[in-house]
Amino acid sequence: WLKIQSARWLNFESAPTDKVYKAFRCAKVASLLGADAAAKTAMSKVTIEMEKLTTSASPDYIGRKLNERFDEEAPLYRYGPATRTAVLTKAYESSECQKYYK
């Protein structure tokens, strides 16, 4: 079963998946900073792509993989509160994330 899921995720690394991940990353950053409206707006930008992904994997599985990728790329647990807030704020204010919040 794990091999099937892993194989699915490997095939899952595509342009739509990257777009979903970028929106997810910005949504998670916004959420961690308490900007829930911005987080919802970011994810609303990839509704169609998410629907397509759920035809090949369960929403729970997709969510788990997105969270794992975020944790690998941004190991926030390694930072103290001030550094964590600075890292999140920099990401939140980035031009990439700002386009998802509008």
Image: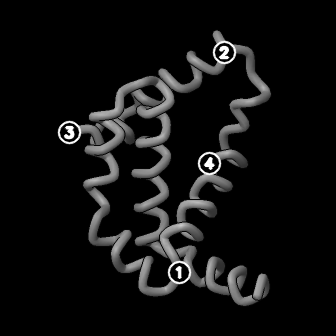
Q: Secondary structure at mark 1?
A: loop
Q: Tell me which numbered mark, 1 or 2, is placed earlier along the sequence.
A: 1
Amino acid of disc 1: Ala
Q: Between tags 1 and 4, which lies in front?
A: 1
* Residue located at (73% from left, 15% from top): 80
Q: Tell me which numbered mark, 3 or 2, is placed earlier along the sequence.
A: 2
* Residue located at (35% from left, 40% from top): 39
Which quarter of the picture shows residue 53? bottom left
Amino acid of disc 2: Thr
* Residue located at (55% from left, 78% from top): 12
Label 2, on which residue? 83
Where is the N terminus found, in terms of image quarters?
bottom right
Mark 3 surroundings within 10 Å by alpha-carbon count, few (fewer than 14), some (14 through 19), many (20 or more): few
Rounded to the nearest whole Å, what is the CA distance between mark 3 and mark 2? 26 Å
Q: Tell me which numbered mark, 3 or 4, is placed earlier along the sequence.
A: 4
Amino acid of disc 4: Phe
Q: Secondary structure at mark 4?
A: helix
Rounded to the nearest whole Å, what is the CA distance between mark 4 and mark 2? 17 Å
Which quarter of the picture shows residue 52? bottom left
Q: Which disc is residue 70 wearing?
A: 4
Q: Secondary structure at mark 2?
A: helix
Relative height, residue 67 to residue 35 (above, below): below
* Circles 1, 4 touching at the beta carbon (< 8 Å): no
Q: Tell me which numbered mark, 3 or 1, is placed earlier along the sequence.
A: 1
Q: Position of residue 4 (x, y in %)?
A: 71, 89
Label 3, on which residue? 102
Q: Tell me which numbered mark, 4 or 2, is placed earlier along the sequence.
A: 4
